[in-house]
Amino acid sequence: MKFDIKLKNHIWFWGSYFTLNFLRWGAYFNDYPYSFKSNLIEFSLHIPLVYFNLFILVPKYVLKQKYITYTAALIASLFGIYLLKTVLTYYIISENIWPEANREYHPFDINHILAVCIGELYVLAMASSVYLTLTWLRERERNRSLRENQFKIKLKYLENQIQPHFFFNTLNNLYALSLESSDKVPDVIIKLSNLMEYVLYDVKGTKFVPLIKEIDYIQNYIEIEKLRFENVEVTINLESNIEDIVVPPLIFISLVENAFKHGGINNNNLKIKINCKVTNNNMLDFEILNNFVISPNHKSKGGIGLVNTKKRLKLIYKNHFSLKGTTKLNYYIIRLQIPIQNED
């Protein structure tokens, strides 16, 4: 526990509490001078007791689950407060140590002891509850901020993994073409440069980008892959108005990569179809199909693209998304559904 509430707020609290108590009892007894002196003595004891409890007794005993020791220490503190209040009242205000009562009381009278202790416990409980509530609210805000920072760091980490993964695959393609001394190499380099510009400048530091730009990015990637594959047919169907829709950057590219990577194995006639539409339940439906000529049970080396995509989707949308892969005849189908988000 830390003294992390500003000093001026403590002063305001005790000043307001003292003023209200002074006016209340002054009006009740029609004796404001007595009320002022009485409250001055009481608050000179209330305040040390409250902070002694908050910053010494609670951290030392309550937080360590030493409840019996805490109770004994609190009782001893209350007894000390009782002695001090009785002495100060006797010598400063009146020899009658409890002027508010209807009769005269002597020190260590059981009723007087109970009245003083209950009054101190009342102030202790009220002030402590205010302080602990404010402390809890501040800690909750810190935890929320910490969770947001952790979310951003984790999301950034996944994005940074996806980008090198994509360029690693593309450079491998470029290397294969260079070994063949292909005249396609310059075109690949130019298109790769355009893709890098999008990744390094257009989407850097942005949480969402226009879907149209993502589609353009995918089309540029497809053009690079077409240079590598001799026979590939790619069809893109945009069935809805998507001009104002925004999506997380680079969220679809791993799905497209997967279609080329696994559909192109031993396949001399690769066919890929991409469908993008808005469903009736306000979800963006992105579906990609690719044919294959090997068994769907064929085991290949796994990549990080789809794994990271699932993790990113989980961070961004929690459970409000769907990513499923199915096989139908000789086609592998991946379908991603995410909530619609507009630019405004």
Image: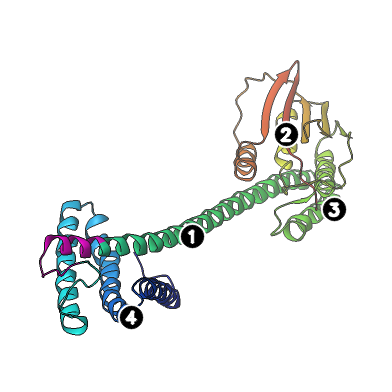
- Which sits earlier in the primary sequence, circle 4 or circle 1? 4
Label 3 sits on residue: 186
Nearer the camera: disc 2 or disc 1: 1
Query: What amino acid is labelled 4 in the image?
Result: Phe
Task: Tell me whether circle 1 and circle 3 mark residues in contact (CB < 8 Å).
Answer: no
- On whether residue 116 falls in the magenta region, the answer is yes
- Pick whichever of labels 2 and 4 is earlier in the sequence: 4
Give the residue type at disc 2. Gln
Disc 3 is placed on an element classified as helix
Assess disc 3: are there few (<14), some (14-19) or many (≥20) residues with their C-alpha within 10 Å of its C-alpha. Answer: few
The residue under label 1 is 142
Give the labeled residue for mark 4. 36
> Which tag is nearer the camera, tag 1 or tag 3?
1
- Give residue 107's position: percent from left, percent from top: 11, 70
In this rendering, the answer to whether 227 lies above or below 207 is: above
Query: Could you tell me which residue is drawn at 24 percent across and 60 percent down?
Result: 118
CA distance separating discs 2 and 4: 70 Å
**Mark in front: 4 vs 3:** 4
Please tell me which of labels 1 and 3 falls first in the chain.
1
Residue 244: which numbered mark, if any? none
What segment carries the magenta color?
103-118
How far is the residue under mark 4 from the one under mark 1? 41 Å
Residues at circles 3 and 2 in contact by the CB criterion of under 8 Å? no
Above-or-below relation of 205 to 218? below
Three-letter amino acid code at the position of disc 1: Arg
**SS for callout 4:** helix
**Horizontal arrangement in the rendering, residue 269 relative to residue 261 (left or right):** right
How packed is label 4: few (under 14 Cα within 10 Å), some, or many (20 or more)? some
